[in-house]
Amino acid sequence: MFNIKPSQRSGFNLVLSLGLLLVIWQLSASYVNSSVLPSPTAVLLQLILSIKSGDLPYHLGITLSRLIVSFLLAMLFGIAIGLLLGRHKKTDDFFDSWLIILLNIPALVTIVMCYVWFGLVESAAILAVVVNKLPNVIVTIREGAKNLDEELLQMAKTYRFGRFKTLQHVVLPQLYPYIMASARTGLALIWKIVLVVELLGRSNGMGYQIHLFFQLFDITSILAYTVSFIVLIQLIEISILKPLDKRSRQWKVN
Amino acid sequence: MSQFIIDIKDKTFPQRNDQEAFTAIQNLRFDIENHQFVCLVGPSGCGKTTLLNLIAGLDSEFNGLIRNSNKGVTIKSSYVFQTPRLLPWRTVLDNIQLAMGENSSPTSVIESLLESLGLKNCLYKFPQQLSLGMQRRVALARAFSVPSDLLLMDEPFVSLDQTTARKARKLLLRLWSEQARKVIFVTHDLNEAFELADRILFLSESPSHIIADIPIDMPQLDRSAVDIKKLKERASIDHPSIHSLL
């Protein structure tokens, strides 16, 4: 009866489910009727206000730049170390316990230690975020590196590909799903950690702002900032990660 | 004309976990010269693939030597594996050009080679869009595109149906006559060996060594099915040691 494309249907479902969430939020806000749970419209108005005043774009920009720098550093080193450990069993056996320790240090401890050792400076903040994300990337990439196709590596060796060509054409395409997985989880994890880092030792960025709003008991602003960031992360997903995914899958039949 | 010397005193896989140490090859020696087409025949598990990997330089843990008779000149080999081993995320053209490296020939040359192998309009296809037979032909094209003195082939036509395999063998012989080079071709199919080879080496069970070295003088393209049968019969009379394989 209806001729709806699957992509349209999923878009429709998304609108429906987000709409439901908004309705629940609105209803509970009007039921509670208190400043601790502002209604979606109040949050939206506050969001527009903060954008107009320039506060939100400034702090959001700061947080975003911290996120991008620490994300790239964590991915770069994570891929390199993960590849090394995945391909060299002896090194992996030796450093495995280090990795487990790193994985289990609470994020808060790393942040505090970085600030104590290196002072309340930008590089300490970035380092704290990278150290928190790094072990996750390493573990994921290591798994991928262990599962590399030996036959294709042999092929690359007989046809004298060399190190760089092998990495680019044989190894990285195989690691791609693992890289994407750690990029996705990484983005979500890193922005949460960046906020804590900012809250504890920076005088700008979203974490700092939220701390401020908390002291002023301005819940509407806290939610407005949160919404703006969630939208931003979604935009990154849609405009960067999804197209990358699609491009890397074009060789697959179906 | 260069001559390649293959002289393997001993190739042993070390003990690992619950597996005992295993000697795959012992005292296996032969020379290969001019543009000889050598077929290696032996029972399965006798170390044929191991031998090819040694010659290709994929495995350097063995006692003995593999070298060019002109000392200091390395052996440049290309390898057609049992499976096509194409990069699934690169197009047919990219797969061939990557193997050729910096001095890759222009697209038109590769295209005409592919066309002669019955792969028209495949340049920009991905391997998974091709049938297994076509992928094997791409692997063959790749091996011939790369400038090499020695072509190693490890049962490249196994698991193809009879007709396709026969066609592939004809193509191989044509390519080889056009771009002559030394070939070492591993097979367990005697008919295939007697159809293709200038010389057949029979290997023993592991630890493998050569038990018979049979030259075939008749040019490959002249051999009919009847000739191949006769060649086989004569070989079994002259070399009783290979009786179990025939």
Image (cartoon, coloured by chain):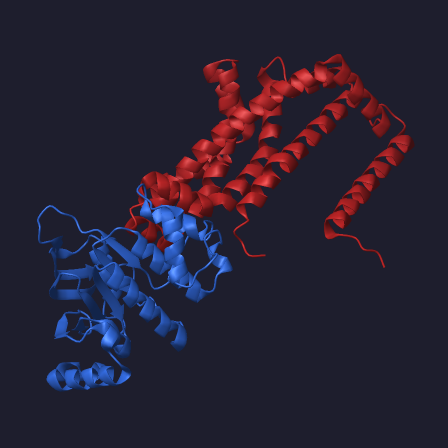
Residue A168 lies, with reference to residue A107, above or below; the image says below
The quarter of the image holding the N terminus of chain B is bottom left
Residue B22 % position (x, y):
21, 65
Residue A183 % position (x, y):
55, 37
Give residue A210's quadrant in the image.
top right
Q: Is residue A157 visible?
A: yes
Residue located 58% across and 30% down the image? A190
Give residue B155's quadrant in the image.
bottom left
Using residue A178 as the reference point, say whether residue B170 is left or right of it. left
Residue located 57% across and 26% down the image? A67
Chain B shade in the render = blue
Using residue A161 as the reference point, say whether residue A194 is left or right of it. right
Residue A232 % position (x, y):
67, 29
Residue located 21% across and 70% down the image? B40
Chain A shade in the render = red
Q: Is residue B43 visible?
A: no
Residue B1 lies, with reference to residue A84, above or below; the image says below
Residue B56 lies, with reference to residue A86, above or below; the image says below
